[in-house]
Image (tube, helix red, strand yellow):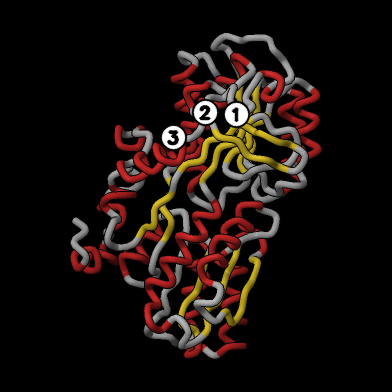
Amino acid sequence: MNTRMRRAAFAVAAGAMAVSLAACGSAKESGGDSSKSSSSSEKKGDDITVGLLLPENQTARYEKFDKPIIEKQIAELTNGKGKVDYLNAKQDATLQSQQIDTMITKKVDVLILDAVDYKAVAQGVKKAKDAGIPVVAYDRLAEGPISAYTSFDNVEVGKTQGEALLKALGGKAKSGKIVMMNGSVTDPNAAQFKKGAHEVLDGKVNIGKEYDTKEWKPENANANMEGAISALGKDKIVGVYSANDGMAGGIITALKSAGLKTLPPVTGQDAELAGVQRIVAGEQYMSVFKSYPQEAETVAKMAVSIAKTGKVDSSLKTSTVDSGTEKGIPSVIVPVVSLTKDNINDTVVKEGYYTVGEICTAKYKAACDKIGLK
């Protein structure tokens, strides 16, 4: 990983995080004591095993950023002695429950869990805790006795998307209908994105159709969009709220297939390479840039700290969140940035996500030149 990717966050995000965490106290102050964070008070050395369970491999981020960054950070924090035992659930909640059992059988020292279904994992989280294995919820706040949590401000993500869509629509905001393509109901983040978007959009646009997209799959978003076009009429749709980039791709394919030569503004999230290229080409209006390096490095620090000492290191300046029956879970919330064609250099390029060469392939060279991306 290059030096840019190892930076905690680019300048804008670093400043925002400083503000967001300034009012937060130490882990002890926020409820991050050993009784909250671990069922064992035994302190361990560097020779630890961290279980890592990620939810799916359709979204590029998990294999490209999360897994390698977490592995690298854990190695650095344990002088090369720590090990990562990794499994991917491939969007299968039942499989993930089995994977939790596997990690318990292997007696990992701590488990990092990004849940496929935040409710379905509750029993597995309890089994892990009962076995003396603390669980750190990653990216999605799972139910059950979680010891710590790190993610982005998901309501703020939805607000960022909604505000960008309103900006793109300008005076045309109520001249037609918008379509809302939310994420999967099994993902608690999707509900928060949706909540934030509605807080911004309600009363300012006319929502013609709204969908909760099964499993976040682009093909499902494509089918939903085809249904919306059929129901509303392609010329009546002035904008589309898409909760992520993968679905935005399916939506844009449906709009093109309907014969629209001028596409309405479409939002996104995750700053996937294909999404960034669509932004360059003018097909997708925006995405939400989230510093996955910062999030991944943070969860690695939390996991190693809990495995070694039974609590979250106070240097992480944790706040707290509540989940179901669990109160005061130590957490770190990472800020987000709206990504448009105007700040590609300052976000994904600067942070080392992609090089200009990777973005500006032959197909997109002219578009890149037009916006000064060189």
Q: Nearer the viewer, residue 124 or 209?
A: 209
Task: Count how many numbered circles sit on residues in the image.
Answer: 3
Q: Residues within 10 Å of mark 1 (few under 14, many from 20)?
A: some
Residue ranking furthest to the front? 23
| Image location of residue 251, percent across then percent down | 51, 73
Disc on res. 22: 3
Establish if 115 lies above or below 289: above
Q: Is mark 1 on a helix, strand or loop?
A: loop
Task: Name which residue type carries label 2.
Answer: Gly
Q: Earlier in the sequence, mark 1 or mark 2?
A: 2
| Image location of residue 106, percent across then percent down | 72, 22
Instruction: State left or right for residue 13 relative to residue 216.
Output: left
Q: What element carries label 2?
A: loop
**Could you tell me which residue is drawn at 55 percent across and 34 percent down?**
319
Establish if 260 lies above or below 98: below
Quarter placement of the C terminus: bottom left
Cα distance in 3D space between marks 1 and 2:
6 Å
Q: What element carries label 3?
A: helix
Task: Name which residue type carries label 3.
Answer: Ala
Whether pointer 1 and pointer 2 mark residues with C-beta atoms closer than 8 Å, the reply is: yes
Q: Name the residue under label 1.
A: 30
Cα distance in 3D space between marks 3 and 1:
13 Å
Cα distance in 3D space between marks 2 and 3:
8 Å
Q: Which of 95 and 296 is in front in this view?
A: 296
| Image location of residue 103, percent across then percent down | 71, 28
The quadrant where residue 226 appears: bottom right
Q: Mark 2 points at which residue?
A: 25
